[in-house]
Image (tube, rainbow, N blue to C red):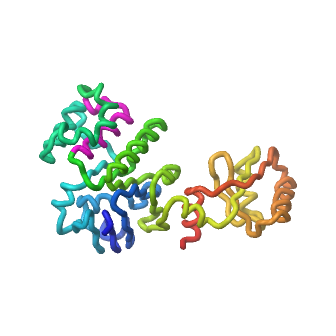
């Protein structure tokens, strides 16, 4: 049995006028690092709140460690760790006071499970007398993770844990998650950052409450099935409009400093005709090169052509 299992879960708000989670089913295996990937409003937080027994589903069923999220909510609350997207610790308490408080809530001590949080806590221990509200974003993140782990949960839910923190702290955080996974903890993490998807064992791409695809990051990328070309010119906005209007182009969207483009017929003749067409429209510093698909490319394709 999976560590987490959802079976046709649905959640609505505002008298059912807003569908936040739309018939979602998936399973997470014990010890897996599973990513729920999607933009704000995709339904990630609603799913996590139902799995941690903070919300009731409208329809469907789900289990965590084999316990039903409705009937066995007390057992689930004692076995899971949850780090919400918004920093929710007591800002007027010190680092150490917050940690001791959460340990007491779960009838344990910092000392009893220190080995589990040691790698994380030693980074904030020099600031243990500082109030939580005075910590930097990265330090708040590490404290919140320590508090979520202090009772040695079997399943850890992290809702957008790296939003708003610097690139170095993001890398450190994912390194911590890999170490937790090695200790046998099942980790579910949600994020809007597509580049973080490749750090997970498996991912579910979600938008508007619906699952678009579930697989390993590599398998999702391999399933893209088309060659992408990266194009740029001196006037990117005009280039975007011209590419979208071209009879040779199947899709085109902005991607960093380039435009990612696929062709209706991918061959040398079509590529040459496209470049001639763009030059005839006075595009300067024109560049076109093949590039590999990434998770974000797959996500955009699934939005347009869901499978």
In front here: 199 or 11? Answer: 199
Q: Quadrant of the C terminus?
A: bottom right
How many marks do you count on the picture?
Answer: 0
Q: Residue at point 83% right, 63% down?
A: 268
Give residue 131's position: percent from left, percent from top. Answer: 25, 29
Decide if residue 257 is on the left or right side of residue 178.
right
Quadrant of the rendering where the N terminus is positioned = bottom left
98 relative to 306 in the view: left or right: left
User: Where does the image place residue 138, in percent across and percent down from the top left?
Assistant: 38, 35
Q: Which residues are magenta?
A: 131-150
User: Which residue: 85% across, 62% down?
Assistant: 273
Name the residue located 66 percent from the left edge and 45 percent from the top edge: 257
Front-most of residues 214 and 207: 214
Rendering coords of residue 109 (x, y %): 16, 40
Q: Is residue 282 above or below residue 23?
A: above
* Magenta-drawn stretch contains 142: yes
Question: In the image shown, does 292 or 160 lie closer to the viewer?
Answer: 292
């Amino acid at each position: 049995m999976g560590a987490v299992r959802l079976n046709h879960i649905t959640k609505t708000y505002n008298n059912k006028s807003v569908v936040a989670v739309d018939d979602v089913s998936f399973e997470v295996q014990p010890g897996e690092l599973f990513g729920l990937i999607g933009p704000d409003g995709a339904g990630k937080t609603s799913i996590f709140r139902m799995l941690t027994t903070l919300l009731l589903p409208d329809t469907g069923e789900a289990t965590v460690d084999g316990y039903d999220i409705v009937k066995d909510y007390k057992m689930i609350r004692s076995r899971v760790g949850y780090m919400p997207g918004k920093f929710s610790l007591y800002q007027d308490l010190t680092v150490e006071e917050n940690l001791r408080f959460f340990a007491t809530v779960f009838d344990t001590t910092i000392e009893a499970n220190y080995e589990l949080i040691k790698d994380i806590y030693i980074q904030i221990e020099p600031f243990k007398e500082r109030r939580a509200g005075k910590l930097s974003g990265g330090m708040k993140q590490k404290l919140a993770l320590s508090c979520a782990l202090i009772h040695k949960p079997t399943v850890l839910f992290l809702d957008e844990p790296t939003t708003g923190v610097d690139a170095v702290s993001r890398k450190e955080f994912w390194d911590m998650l890999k170490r937790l996974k090695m200790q046998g903890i099942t980790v579910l993490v949600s994020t809007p950052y597509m580049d973080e998807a490749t750090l997970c064992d498996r991912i579910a791409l979600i938008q508007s409450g619906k699952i678009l695809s579930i697989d390993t990051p590599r398998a999702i990328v391999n399933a893209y099935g088309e060659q992408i070309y990266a194009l740029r010119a001196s006037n990117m906005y005009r280039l975007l409009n011209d590419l979208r209007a071209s009879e040779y182009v199947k899709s085109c969207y902005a991607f960093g400093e380039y435009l990612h483009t696929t062709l209706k017929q991918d061959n040398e003749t079509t590529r040459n005709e496209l470049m001639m067409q763009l030059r005839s429209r006075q595009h300067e510093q024109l560049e076109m090169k093949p590039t590999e698909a990434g998770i974000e490319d797959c996500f955009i394709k699934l939005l347009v052509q869901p499978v």
